[in-house]
Image: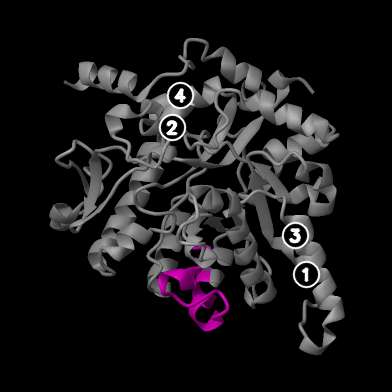
Amino acid sequence: MNTDDLILVSIDDHVVEPLDMFDHHVPRKWADYAPRVVADEKGIDHWIYRDRPTGVAGLNAVVTWPAEEWGRDPAGYAEMRPAVYNVHDRVRDMDANGVLTSMCFPTFTGFSAGHLSRGGQDEITVAMISAYNDWHLEDWAGAYPGRFIPIGILPMWDPQLAVAEIERLAARGCHSVTMPELPHIDGLPSYHDIDYWAPVFHALQDNDTVMNLHIGQGFGVLRLAPDAPIDNLMVLAPSISLIAAQDLLWGPAFRQFPKLKVALSEGGVGWIPFFLDRSDRHYTNQRWLRRDFGGKMPSDVFREHVLACYVTDRTALKFRHDIGIDNIAWECDYPHSDSIWPNAPEFVLEELLAAGADDDDIHKITWANACRHFNWNPFGHIPRERATVGALRATATDVDVSTRSRADYAAAYTRLHG
């Protein structure tokens, strides 16, 4: 396969929410509570919701910055590449990278609306969550039909509220939501508590909505040494996906809800062969525990429910058929520090060919598996011949893909906005 013939669908990217995102979506009676961006005395931008501030860490918006400028320090909007928060520029960057479709997780709200929820678990926060989802569906994904798989956030503190939002989103064509990997870390019942989660799992099944678990919310489970460097957290982060998978596979979720679909984001796929081998060995060896997988092996049940995605997993791709060739998808992670932009097609294809993948395997991993799992028609708005890397890049030859410093972006932002 040639690079230009690839079709790329990324099921893990991110949007840093634009400054005006709540302006047209919050009910008038709650307008004074709407989150807003305020610059502190040092000129650093912070989202404020009910007096609780949160910033945008630099690692979340480093695309095109020189590597020596990467870090955990906050990034202001003026310092970011506009495509980080502007949908029109984002689509141009997707074209330049040959990416047909992207699913964009939130930033300041938290992957599972955690930051909003910590501001108050009440009808005001429910309204803000709905406003976020309306913005995402209308102003982000809706601005370019076919280019974004929409994903919503939920009020997780009340199963009935979560069910209502799942149903509302599904009625509007959104069949993907972000949920916590390990809800007990946030003081919610774990996924083993089926009495609490059954209504949510029923709603997900009934509405063909995918439960997306993105690494981050569950970091607290690692209990790393207090003096450990950030490298420990970043390298070990995929282990949280393993723990989340364990709770769902060995708890009641997968066995009681056979049509529940889960997507694991940013956790890679390299841990899966060990996890499945260990699960099957445990199931057959520890008979005294009397676990019941309905006549199937745990690995079979895992493969029926889970899609996992990777940015780079050179070694694991050699074991793609042991993992499950239908259970692997690709992610770009734009605009984070792990992102492969603007050379994703070359990077992805080289890695797959080095692993011995044929054209059928390549198509499954780069787009077909994701589109099947999310019931997404990749060519519903853009014909296949215009959806390839080569065709998309041909429309974006004028996009500047050069390295630019934060100061360069800030100067350009000042010239444009004053």
Badge 3 amino acid: Arg
Magenta span: 180-200
Measure the C-alpha gap from mark 1 to mark 2. Answer: 38 Å
| Residue 28 appears in the figure | no
Secondary structure at numbered mark 3: helix
Q: What residue is at 51 percent from the left and 66 percent from the top?
A: 223
Mark 1 or mark 3, which has the lower sequence index? 1
Residue 17 point in image, percent of width and height: 34, 41
Measure the C-alpha gap from mark 4 to mark 3. Answer: 40 Å
Whether pointer 1 and pointer 2 mark residues with C-beta atoms closer than 8 Å, the reply is no
Mark 3 or mark 2, which has the lower sequence index? 2
Measure the C-alpha gap from mark 3 to mark 2. Answer: 34 Å
Mark 1 or mark 2, which has the lower sequence index? 2
**Circle 2 is placed at which residue position?**
62
In the image, residue 8 above or below residue 212? above
**Which numbered mark, 1 or 3, is in the foreground of this view?**
1
Say which of 95 and 376 sits in front: 95
**Which numbered mark, 1 or 2, is in the foreground of this view?**
2
Mark 4 or mark 3, which has the lower sequence index? 4
Was residue 198 drawn as part of the magenta stretch in this picture?
A: yes
Badge 4 amino acid: Pro
In the picture, measured across the screen, residue 289 lies left or right of residue 127, that is: right
**Circle 4 is placed at which residue position?**
66
Question: Which quadrant holds the N terminus?
Answer: top right
**Circle 1 is placed at which residue position?**
279
Crowding around mark 1 (Cα neighbors within 10 Å: few <14, some 14 to 19, many 20+) is some
Q: Any mark on residue 21, and which?
A: none
In the picture, measured across the screen, residue 366 lies left or right of residue 212, that is: right
**Circle 3 is placed at which residue position?**
303
Was residue 256 drawn as part of the magenta stretch in this picture?
A: no
